[in-house]
Image (cartoon, rainbow, N blue to C red):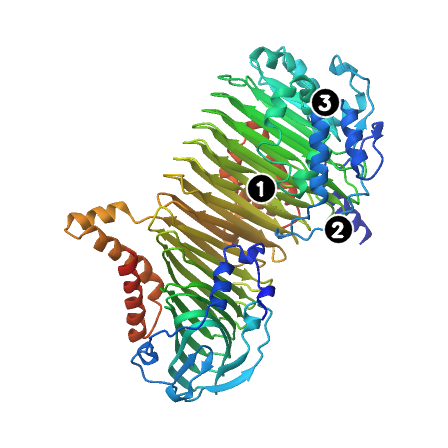
Amino acid sequence: MTLLQLPTPKQEEWRWADMAALRTAAGSAPQPTGIDPASLFLDLEGPRLLFVDGVFDPARSTPGPLQITRWTPETTHPLGQLAQGEGWTLSLAAQQAASCIQVVHLGSGGESHVPAQIVLAEDAVASMVETFAGTGWANRLLQVKLARGARLMRSVRLIQSAGFVSIRDEAEIGEAASLVSVFLAAGGMASRIDGGITVIGKGAFAEMGGALLTRETQKQEAAVVVRHEAIEGSSRQLWRAVAADRSTASLAARVEVARGAQQTDGEQSLRGLLLARTATVNLKPELEIFADDVKCAHGATVGELDQRAMFYLQSRGVPENRAKALLTRAFVADALARIGEDTVREAFAADADAWLDTAL
Amino acid sequence: MATRNAEAHAAANKKYEWGFASDVEQEFAPKGLSEDTVRYISAKKGEPAWMLDWRLKAFAAWQAMELPEWAKLAIPHIDYQDAYYYAEPKQKKTIGSLDELDPEILRVYEKLGIPIEEQKVLAGVEGARKVAVDAVFDSVSVATTFRKELEAAGVIFRSISEAIREYPDLVRKYLGKVVPVRDNFFSALNAAVFSDGTFVYIPEGVRCPMELSTYFRINAENTGQFERTLIVADKGSYVSYLEGCTAPMRDENQLHAAVVELVAMDDAEIKYSTVQNWYPGDENGVGGIFNFVTKRALCEGKNAKVSWTQVETGSAITWKYPSCILKGDGSVGEFYSVAVTNGRQQADTGTKMLHLGKNTRSTIVSKGISAGRSDNTYRGQVLVQPGAENVRNFTQCDSLLLGDQCGAHTVPYIEVKNPSAQIEHEATTSKISEDQLFYARQRGLDQEAAVALIVNGFAKEVLQQLPMEFAVEAQKLLGISLEGSVG
């Protein structure tokens, strides 16, 4: 395989990436996971896809409008390039709707690569939930094209117990279209969530955000670039990182405003919370602006839990651990609030709670 | 049309008032860079063997290094063999007083408004504010004023080649300590071929009686300037140091690769201010100085403080990150910067605050102003190491865009390994609003005066950190740099 061509931390865009964990996961021998794939689907109507070790499982899937095909996507992204072979596509005609699509990836070790594609015609609407469970290196590429007025809501949770998950999202957002994607990494794996979103239509909206929860010696990372090429676009990048034990959580977010993309409104909020003395949070809120009539602001903070809030809760009889968990939950909740579907949001919050119970 | 062109030309020329070249007789080392060049410079300076050794090691290291590419800069190919690495104004062997200095050089400094002579006169006037000046002309320090008075206070203020001869132990102890030879491509190059610069030592408990200042001037064609500044502030001392730079207008690019090292011991404070006004090239990006500078301060002792203030208006390309290593407990680092780019200038500048000690604090205020077809990047890093308790950092980066053909970028890195740290970062990007302009115009200001006023207001937080004389000059420079960029 192509492990030799993998990026290295010497490259500026990959300086916080945990390539060693990726190599280890890729080389790990398959072992039974003991997870029932059915338990990974949420109780929601809609098409379901199950990939076990990157292989489509037709018996336990109900594809509906989704198609399973083999292809090699075009991308220049070093990990995205590797995602070729069997994958899924969704294309909706104008004003059609599909919800809530569920895609579950269960890994038992070794590497698996799945490409995916979503093409929504004018005013089409779709929502999807993707779940990563098990172990091994799961490498995924998703390419999204939204025509005028199309809307996509995407929620992704990473709850693998070990291994590595790398996700590359590439999206082109047309006029007045909207893409909202929310990620939650609350497992034991290392990860790299990579986004390249381009606003190509007037007045489009792009949001990519989420929460990375890391513990033990885990390293997780999100690296997102939102590029505005059309006027009056707006984008939001709201990320939260919580690092416990000896772990590292890294957030790199960039807003690019191309020449002529006037009246762009870009907002970034990156916040890190350190739960232990040995943990690390890295933030890189980047702006690259070539137009003069824009509103771009970013805020970034790192710190520990507010000591006054801790004291207040304890003075009301809440035990220390519980108080920590409550405050941390509130810190993470910001990032999950954007998930529209109640069932999905609650499931994600439950995953975050489960993580907090183990970490604190 | 022709008249308009001529007028435009005159206006463009006016923009850079310091663009004259002067006919000072000069002595060059042969073009090109090799071990022999390094040996030549060292011999010319009459350096001890350890210094030559150090240079040769640096040269060997440099040969194996590559130009850094991470900055957001389009750097044209630089032929390191097609430049002079040593140019010395021919002068009498030793100068007893300023009267013996080549009058042509004196005239240059007069034109620049550097008051070497004037200061001597003023020295007799009671209550006059004194500034000691070290003037570096191409590669060589030509004049250092107020030496005696400084010596009485115990302050050593020398060109670095003199210091190497007169205080070898002191120089040897600190040279390359803050910026190691192998730190980066340009620091290695500088270590190999640096020809002069300034050395300052402030002894324990001394508050330097006057501001110290170095004025750098590149004059000769095809030369690179590589100066080295080393400032050591011993326990409880204080010094304020100013630096200014200009160069003639020439069509080819010239390289300026300086290294500045600051060391502050317990309770010492160093205030380092720069007004950088190297020739920026013409509006089409022809010519100009490549300003690739490594500046770093080490807060070695407890409660040491280093404050960098910079006003960057010149240079075709700026690559510069004045940084603080906050090693001593309770030490403080500050960085105040205004960077203005116009025409086709590119600036990639910012700072690093490396928090190693407990209770260390840092403040970063960066104001970027882009106009014309220029690019202006803030690139910074705040790093908190595991042992650094109760670190506090506040960063503010504001960008102002004048026109729709320029770019403003912010690339901050925040790396925190201690939960007791409080790190805040804020950034905004904006343009001058029509309302602001309208208001100023309505009060009778013309377009340019209005823009200058608003820009000065935008940069005020930084400008007020500068010593008074510099602040006035900087304010004027901002206005000149942005002339013709609006309306």
**Mark 1 residue element:** loop
The answer to which image quadrant residue A269 occupies is bottom left
Same chain shared by disc 3 and disc 1: yes
Residue that mark 1 sits on: B321
**Which mark's residue is nearer the viewer, 2 or 3?**
3
- Find the distance from the CA under tag 2 to the CA under tag 3: 35 Å
Q: Which is more toward the observer, A215 or B281?
A: A215
- Find the distance from the CA under tag 3 to the CA under tag 1: 31 Å
- Mark 3: give few (<14), some (14-19) or many (20+) Cα within 10 Å: few
Relative image position of residue B342 (x, y in whole percent): 65, 48
Relative image position of residue B361 (x, y in whole percent): 42, 36
- Mark 1 vs mark 2: which is more N-terminal? 2
- Mark 2 vs mark 3: which is more N-terminal? 3
Residue that mark 3 sits on: B48
Report the side of A341 relative to B93 (left or right).
left
Residue that mark 2 sits on: B77
Q: Which mark is residue B199?
A: none
Chain name for mark 3: B
Residue drawn at the location 46% of the way across and 49% of the way down = B414
Identify residue type, mark 3. Pro
Relative image position of residue B235 (x, y in whole percent): 48, 21
- Mark 3 vs mark 1: which is more N-terminal? 3
